[in-house]
Image (spheres, helix red, strand yellow):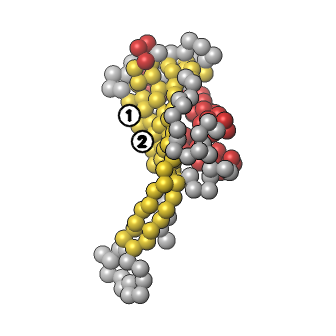
Amino acid sequence: MACAPALTVGADAASNLEPAAYRSYTWEMPDQLPTGDPRLDNNPFFISEVQRQVDQQLGKLGLMKAQSGGDLTLHFHATVRDRVNVYEADRAAGYDQTGYAQSQVVSYEEGTILIDIADVKGKKVIWRGWMQTDLSGAIGNNDELARRVRDGMTKLFAKFPAACIAPVG
């Protein structure tokens, strides 16, 4: 049975990253752009959960969150949009589908979170990562929303270039 697409992530890093160049980071204020869903616009739980999960992942990598004056600055953007996927029945395997629908339509709420990490000097983005997931049933359910953000950030930050983080000590 077809369902909404699974969690996907992607990332791009600057080609000229300095090895062991960064130790700390700070967050910029969340942008005021609408997410496309009034249930998430200015939602304090969602904003703090994204930041908390990113903080955890960067901490595991060895970056420290600073109150001010960090080497890096972070911000994120989020969007939600209604999506419809149509899955065509697979006839290539030779299965007889007489009496069954030729395709299946799946509607879901696609959530995208984009994380930008910039070098404070010149605010040059050194890394941009994104995650997309089905948010159907998660918006309004804080436990489920937190789980989906956590899963996405865990998978996303596995792509972060750890070589650019300065060792502690």
Point out the image quarter for the C terminus.
top right
Q: Residue at x 39, y 73 (%)?
A: 103
Disc on res. 69: none
Q: Are marks 2 and 1 in contact (CB under 8 Å)?
A: yes
Circle 1 SS class: strand
Pick whichever, 76 or 168, lies toward us: 76
Q: Tell me the number on the disc at residue 10.
A: 2
The location of residue 122, given as percent across then percent down, is 41, 14
Q: Judge whether 158 appears above or below 169 on screen.
A: below
All told, the count of numbered labels is: 2
> Label 2 sits on what residue type?
Gly
* Amino acid type assigned to the residue bearing label 1 in the image: Asp
Question: Which residue is painted at 36% across and 85% down in the image?
Answer: 96
Which residue is the site of mark 1? Answer: 12
Residue 15 place in picture, x, y as percent: 32, 26
Name which residue lies at 56% across and 52% down. 135
